[in-house]
Image: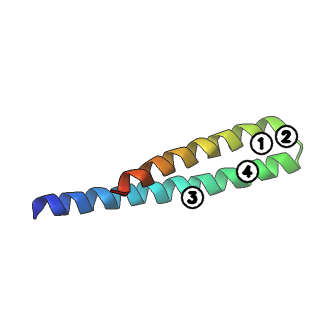
Amino acid sequence: MEALRRGRRSSSAVVVYVIILMSLQVFLVTVAAEAYLADDSGMAWATAVASIVLFACAAAFLKYLRP
Protein backbone atom coordinates (compact mmCIF):
# COMPACT_ATOMS: atom_id res chain seq x y z
CA MET A 1 0.00 0.00 0.00
CA GLU A 2 2.84 2.39 0.86
CA ALA A 3 4.59 1.63 -2.45
CA LEU A 4 1.42 2.58 -4.34
CA ARG A 5 1.23 5.93 -2.55
CA ARG A 6 4.91 6.61 -3.18
CA GLY A 7 4.49 5.81 -6.88
CA ARG A 8 1.44 8.04 -7.15
CA ARG A 9 3.25 10.88 -5.36
CA SER A 10 6.27 10.67 -7.68
CA SER A 11 3.96 10.57 -10.71
CA SER A 12 2.24 13.72 -9.51
CA ALA A 13 5.60 15.45 -9.08
CA VAL A 14 6.62 14.51 -12.62
CA VAL A 15 3.34 15.91 -13.98
CA VAL A 16 3.97 19.20 -12.14
CA TYR A 17 7.51 19.38 -13.61
CA VAL A 18 6.15 18.75 -17.10
CA ILE A 19 3.53 21.48 -16.71
CA ILE A 20 6.17 23.96 -15.55
CA LEU A 21 8.54 23.01 -18.38
CA MET A 22 5.82 23.31 -21.01
CA SER A 23 4.68 26.71 -19.76
CA LEU A 24 8.26 27.94 -19.86
CA GLN A 25 8.60 26.50 -23.35
CA VAL A 26 5.51 28.39 -24.56
CA PHE A 27 7.01 31.60 -23.15
CA LEU A 28 10.31 30.93 -24.94
CA VAL A 29 8.58 30.24 -28.25
CA THR A 30 6.75 33.55 -27.89
CA VAL A 31 10.00 35.39 -27.18
CA ALA A 32 11.69 33.65 -30.13
CA ALA A 33 8.89 34.63 -32.50
CA GLU A 34 8.96 38.22 -31.28
CA ALA A 35 12.76 38.39 -31.63
CA TYR A 36 12.53 36.94 -35.14
CA LEU A 37 9.97 39.55 -36.15
CA ALA A 38 12.21 42.28 -34.71
CA ASP A 39 15.18 41.05 -36.79
CA ASP A 40 17.14 39.95 -33.72
CA SER A 41 18.28 36.61 -35.08
CA GLY A 42 20.71 35.92 -32.22
CA MET A 43 17.99 36.11 -29.59
CA ALA A 44 15.58 34.18 -31.81
CA TRP A 45 17.97 31.26 -32.27
CA ALA A 46 19.02 31.20 -28.61
CA THR A 47 15.46 31.05 -27.35
CA ALA A 48 14.47 28.52 -30.00
CA VAL A 49 17.32 26.21 -28.94
CA ALA A 50 16.36 26.63 -25.27
CA SER A 51 12.78 25.76 -26.17
CA ILE A 52 13.91 22.60 -27.95
CA VAL A 53 15.97 21.56 -24.92
CA LEU A 54 12.95 22.08 -22.66
CA PHE A 55 10.83 20.00 -25.01
CA ALA A 56 13.37 17.17 -24.81
CA CYS A 57 13.35 17.34 -21.01
CA ALA A 58 9.56 17.29 -20.87
CA ALA A 59 9.46 14.33 -23.28
CA ALA A 60 11.93 12.46 -21.09
CA PHE A 61 9.79 13.11 -18.01
CA LEU A 62 6.67 11.92 -19.84
CA LYS A 63 8.48 8.78 -20.93
CA TYR A 64 9.19 8.14 -17.23
CA LEU A 65 5.44 8.11 -16.54
CA ARG A 66 4.66 5.43 -19.08
CA PRO A 67 5.24 1.84 -17.94
What whole-number distance in Å separates the C-alpha atoms at marks 1 and 4?
Answer: 7 Å
Q: Going 57% across and 49% down the picture, which residue do you hit? A: 55
Give the residue pinned by disc 3: 23
Instruction: Find the residue positioned furthest to the top.
Output: 42
Q: Quadrant of the C terminus?
A: bottom left
The amino acid type of the residue labelled 4 equals Val
Give the residue pinned by disc 4: 31
Give the residue pinned by disc 2: 40
Mark 1 in CB contact with mark 2 (< 8 angstroms): yes
Q: Earlier in the sequence, mark 3 or mark 2?
A: 3
- Left or right placement of residue 7 versus residue 63 in this view: left
Q: Position of residue 40 (x, y in %)?
A: 85, 40
The amino acid type of the residue labelled 2 equals Asp
Mark 1 in CB contact with mark 4 (< 8 angstroms): no
What whole-number distance in Å separates the C-alpha atoms at marks 1 and 2?
Answer: 6 Å
Return the mark for residue 44: 1
Mark 1 in CB contact with mark 3 (< 8 angstroms): no
The amino acid type of the residue labelled 1 equals Ala
SS type, badge 3: helix
